[in-house]
Image (cartoon, rainbow, N blue to C red):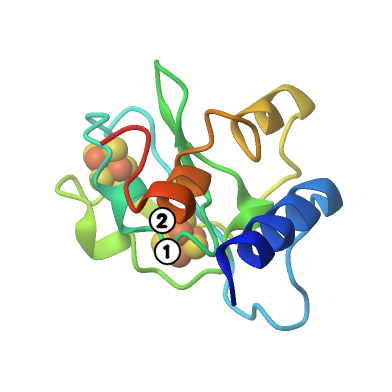
Amino acid sequence: MTSTRLMEARAARVRAKRRHEPKWKNPPVRIEPWECIVCDSCLRACPPQFGAIFNDGIDVKVIPELCSGCNRCIPACPMDCIYPDEEWEPTPLDRWRLAGGSGDPYLAVRRFGSRAAD
Ligand code: SF4
Ligand code: SF4
């Protein structure tokens, strides 16, 4: 898939604001904020085609609708504070500002080969 098509696919998924059911069988993950040291290792481990983890300047958060449940982030975490979230709830509207805009670190990967946060 070309860079442009990847960006279009991401934009479409951000607009849809939902998981790719029934394709994604695993639950999304959540980060326990009281254990997290905000090191961004999980963000870097999350495949750009999913791009579900964001640093909002205070916490590192998962947008579950973008999370495939691939679990690539779990072994990257030095604090073991990423957990499957069977009872995930829809992302609050204000958090969606992190995804798909000019500051989206995963769009930077596709454009320039590195994340904005790197
Ligand atoms: S489980 Fe996969 S898609 Fe979800 S946040 Fe972790 S690395 Fe990203
Ligand atoms: S890798 Fe773990 S400790 Fe580091 S930001 Fe992610 S959840 Fe927090």
Secondary structure, mark 1, is loop
Q: Quadrant of residue 79?
A: top left
**Residue found 39% across the figure and 38% down from its top:** 32
Q: Quadrant of residue 91?
A: top right
Q: Amino acid at mark 2?
A: Tyr
**Dot 1: within a 10 Å radius of its alpha carbon, few (fewer than 14), some, or many (20 or more) residues?**
some
Q: Amino acid at mark 1?
A: Pro
The mark nearer the N terminus, 2 or 1, is: 1
**Residue found 28% across the figure and 33% down from its top:** 36
Q: Nearer the viewer, mark 2 or mark 1?
A: 1
Q: Is residue 30 above or below residue 50?
A: above
Looking at this view, is 60 or 117 the one in front? 117
Task: Give the image location of residue 15, x and y in percent.
Answer: 83, 47
**Dot 2: within a 10 Å radius of its alpha carbon, few (fewer than 14), some, or many (20 or more) residues?**
some
Looking at this view, is 75 or 66 the one in front? 66
**Residue found 57% across the figure and 59% down from its top:** 67
Task: Give the image location of residue 64, x and y in percent.
Answer: 62, 51
Q: Is residue 31 left or right of residue 65?
A: left
| Distance from Cα at disc 2 to Cα at disc 1 | 17 Å
Task: Give the image location of residue 82, x and y in percent.
Answer: 36, 51
Looking at this view, is 29 or 106 the one in front? 106
Secondary structure, mark 2, is strand
Mark 1 CB within 8 Å of ligand 1: yes
Residue situated furthest right in the rendering: 16
Where the N terminus falls, by quadrant? bottom right
Question: What residue is pinned by disc 1?
Answer: 47
Question: What residue is pinned by disc 2?
Answer: 83
